[in-house]
Amino acid sequence: MSKRMEMKLIEDRALRDAALALVKADIHHLRADFAAKSIGERVIDRASEGAADIFEEAKELADDHKGVLATLIAAIFIWFARHPIASLFTDGDEDDASDEQWDDDWDEDEADEYYG
């Protein structure tokens, strides 16, 4: 074997050994890290950090667009209160009148003939 090939072989082995040492060190760090915190705890931490970031961004947007937010809240309130609000503009007798009309129009004999 030539001197040049021997030097190349020695360099390649040194690189291989250094890479192996790095991989082993990474595995050691991962094991130590997972021993301190489980995967479930990590997922919960990451989710809570993400939720906190979203909350902060929503807070900033709400501060920037207070008028839009107030309009949205008012629209939601009016939507849920639409029946009580509508009853303020009607006397409530319209439903009873339509029920009486239905009773007047109903004919037992015709219903018997129709339904058998």
Image (tube, helix red, strand yellow):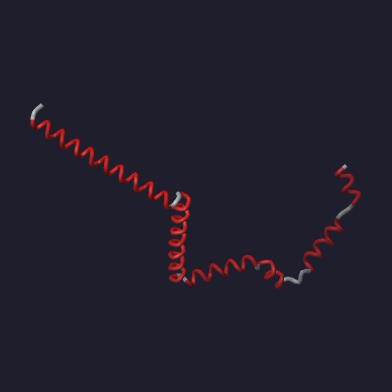
Q: Residue at x 41, y 49 (%)?
A: 34
Q: Is residue 49 left or right of residue 77?
A: left
- Above or below — where is 10 with respect to 55? above
Q: Going by the picture, which residue comes out furthest to the left?
A: 3
Please name whichever residue, 12 or 87, is drawn nearer the observer in this view of the structure: 12
Please name whichever residue, 57 or 75, is drawn nearer the observer in this view of the structure: 57
Please name whichever residue, 54 or 91, is drawn nearer the observer in this view of the structure: 54
Give the x, y percent position of residue 97: 81, 65
Q: Residue at x 44, y 58 (%)?
A: 50
Q: Residue at x 51, y 69 (%)?
A: 69
> How many numbered marks, from 0 up?
0
Give the x, y percent position of residue 60: 43, 68
- Above or below — where is 17 with respect to 37? above
Give the x, y percent position of residue 104: 87, 59
Quadrant (top left, top right, bottom left, bottom right) of the N terminus? top left
Q: Residue at x 12, y 35 (%)?
A: 7
| Quarter of image, res 90 | bottom right
Quadrant (top left, top right, bottom left, bottom right) of the C terminus? top right
- Above or below — where is 69 with respect to 111? below
Q: Going by the picture, which residue comes out furthest to the top?
A: 1
Give the x, y percent position of residue 103: 86, 58
| Quarter of image, res 8 | top left
